[in-house]
Amino acid sequence: MSSKILASFAALLLLVGLSACATAPTDPAERAEFERNNDPLEPMNRSIFEFNQVLDRILLKPAAQAYRYVVPDFARDIVGNVIYNSGEPVRMTNALLQGRATDAGKIFNRFLVNSTIGLGGMIDMGSESDLKPVAADFGQTLHVWGAPEGPYLVLPLLGPSNPRDTVGFAVDSVAQPWGYIADGYGGRATAVRYTIASAGAYALDKRTKYLDALDALEKGSLDFYAQLRSVSRQHRNAELGIMPSNDESEYGDAPAPVKKKHKKHKAKAAVPAAAAPAAPAKH
């Protein structure tokens, strides 16, 4: 997907969103719930959500079910490992942009091990060597730099997001080096074929991983849209290190927020370790 297409898509979403904003309720309790949901674009979001649900029912879910039925577990693991390994250079760059030098080193070592001993990422040798996956994307980078989240947003095909993460996804997509490498070796046609194949494999792998979880969530929800909104926002906040009762980020070795100094006591208090970023959901 080119940067021009992404920019046009973002502009279209903005125009539609401005004409589809929900009116904030006047009742104090309802107003508090409205602000907590952070979903002023709910009419537009629900329409896009319904479109995504129809597409999922007729295409994505059946394809994922067939993929899981036909392809054995070990082969699906290989596909997932290769997809994840291909994203490591972008994760490493984002970790550096966030000031997480230690995490960037872990990502580099993991990529090196998996790309060599792991046969191009087919085998996750990094996890076997205690080099666990580290989450880092440009949406997180913007968060660390102080960019606001913006309102909840449902994207066509892509699902739950927000303006900050939408920009982050676009930047990460453009920053992936493999399409440029394919272009350099095989020309533009090869690059296009690679982009289509990688996007399709990513979507199929991700949908397959969440088959059971999404089915259970839908069956147990009176309002699947609202439930998915809540779960997706909680998951993203966990990736950002935002605790439910504390709106601060705890990022590996990123610069810690400035905190109010307290008087020193003779007994030293134990300092809890910073929470590591949540492992990606096979993103």
Image (cartoon, grey):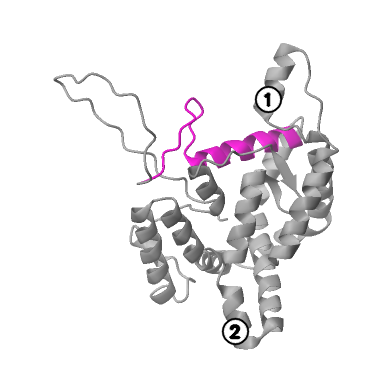
Give amino acid for label 1.
Glu
Q: With 224 as the anchor, is 90 left or right in this view?
A: left
Relative height, residue 56 to residue 113 (above, below): above
Region in magenta: 225-252
Relative height, residue 156 to residue 23 (above, below): below
The residue singled out by tag 2 in the image is 184
Relative height, residue 54 to residue 2 (above, below): above
Q: Nearer the viewer, residue 37 or 227?
A: 37
Q: Tell me the SS state at disc 1.
A: helix
* Residue under the point 35% across and 46% down: 253
Distance from the alpha carbon under mark 1 to that under mark 2? 48 Å
Q: Nearer the viewer, residue 142 or 154?
A: 142
* Residue under the point 54% across and 53% down: 138
Q: Tell me residue 188's x, y (percent).
A: 69, 82
Q: Is residue 132 magenta?
A: no
Q: Is residue 239 magenta?
A: yes
* Residue under the point 67% across and 55% down: 207
Residue 111 seen from this side: yes
The residue singled out by tag 1 in the image is 35
Residue 133 seen from this side: no
In primary-sequence order, the first of circles 1 and 2 is: 1
Relative height, residue 118 to residue 242 (above, below): below
Q: Are marks 1 and 2 in contact (CB under 8 Å)?
A: no
Give amino acid for label 2.
Gly
* Residue under the point 30% across and 33% down: 272
